[in-house]
Amino acid sequence: MPRMVTLILGNRDDIEEMSNSSSVVLTTVLKLIDKYDLYGQVAYPKHHKQSEVPDIYRLAAKTKGVFINPALVEPFGLTLIEAAAYGLPVVATKNGGPVDILKALNNGLLVDPHDQKAIADALLKLVADKNLWTECRKNGLKNIHRFSWPEHCRNYLSHVEHCRNRHPTSRLEITPIPEEPMSDSLKDVEDLSLRFSIEGDPKLNGELDAATRQRN
Ligand SMILES: O=c1ccn([C@@H]2O[C@H](COP(=O)(O)OP(=O)(O)O[C@H]3O[C@H](CO)[C@@H](O)[C@H](O)[C@H]3O)[C@@H](O)[C@H]2O)c(=O)[nH]1
Ligand SMILES: O=P(O)(O)OC[C@H]1O[C@](O)(CO)[C@@H](O)[C@@H]1O
């Protein structure tokens, strides 16, 4: 059975009204579909809702697809984390956050976004090599906890601790800022967010509870 390729290329009513860079990409893709006579084999839906995004990742994983982020520069790369969480292997730009993400997750391949052949080779490799695809899927699912909020907070605090140990004599001077009265709906939000983020670590929770008690 022939594969249907689904391209999620941005919400639009009219290509002419998209930003210049987005409309150039979409127009190029439409021309390529025409050039290679791929009618009926490629879908490029005009709209999707944010609530449908999880199902798009799920569908891509279920049909043994690959997520690609070929940004020229990607400051972080939340979409890679999302793809990994749905068991979808990735091909991603080697410029920016994906380098660290793939080091932690080991769930795909990095490419030079200017190198068309490298992008095509990486996509084909992941689609064609079933063992590699499955390994990347498993690695992503196994390692995704490294990007959970509790893990992020633990890492952050351990980096702070490391810096403090390296410079034991330097002190952080904190100038107290006069507190604005909070509206009722915001009360305790600050403390709660801290507790949520390190939930599951009794040692850290204990330290924070003590700090909160001291402040009150
Ligand atoms: O049509 C879309 C496009 C994106 N998203 C979601 O929006 C979020 C952010 O998407 P992204 O395209 O990465 O957003 P940007 O705001 O352009 O990216 C900035 O913000 C991201 C989130 O912090 C970082 O990962 C990027 O590095 C940074 O450039 C993600 O959860 C996506 O799933 C949708 O729901 N629908
Ligand atoms: O490929 P370009 O033009 O560098 O765009 C990359 C940008 O697009 C996004 O991937 C999505 O908007 C951003 O996260 C990123 O900064």
Image (cartoon, grey):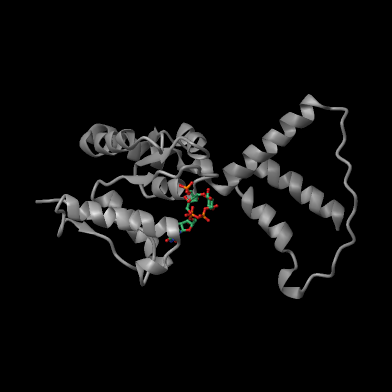
Of 176 and 197, nearer the camera is 176
Which quadrant of the structure image shows residue 215? bottom right
Image quadrant where residue 112 sits: top left
* Most foreground residue, 183 or 73: 73
Query: Relative to residue 196, is residue 15 drawn left or right?
Result: left
Residue sitting at the far top: 166
Residue 205 percent coordinates (x, y): 69, 47
Q: How many marks?
A: 0
In which quadrant is the C terminus drawn?
bottom right
- Residue 87 vertical placement versus 179 (above, below): above
Residue 151 in sight from this viewpoint = yes
> Relative to the observer, which residue lies in front, 31 or 12?
31
Residue 145, position in %: x, y? 49, 43
Residue drawn at (39%, 61%) of the image = 10
What is the residue that sits farthest to the bottom in this orientation?
Answer: 184
Q: Is residue 48 visible?
A: no
Q: Describe residue 156's horizontal placement relative to residue 179 as left or right.
A: left
Relative height, residue 78 to residue 160 (above, below): below
Please, is residue 190 above or below residue 103 in the view? below
Q: Position of residue 161 (x, y in %)?
A: 74, 33
Q: Is residue 145 left or right of residue 27?
A: right
Determine the residue positioned at 31% across, 45% down. 66
Residue positioned most to the left: 1
Which of these two is toward me, 86 or 128? 128
* Residue 183 on image: x %, y %: 77, 74
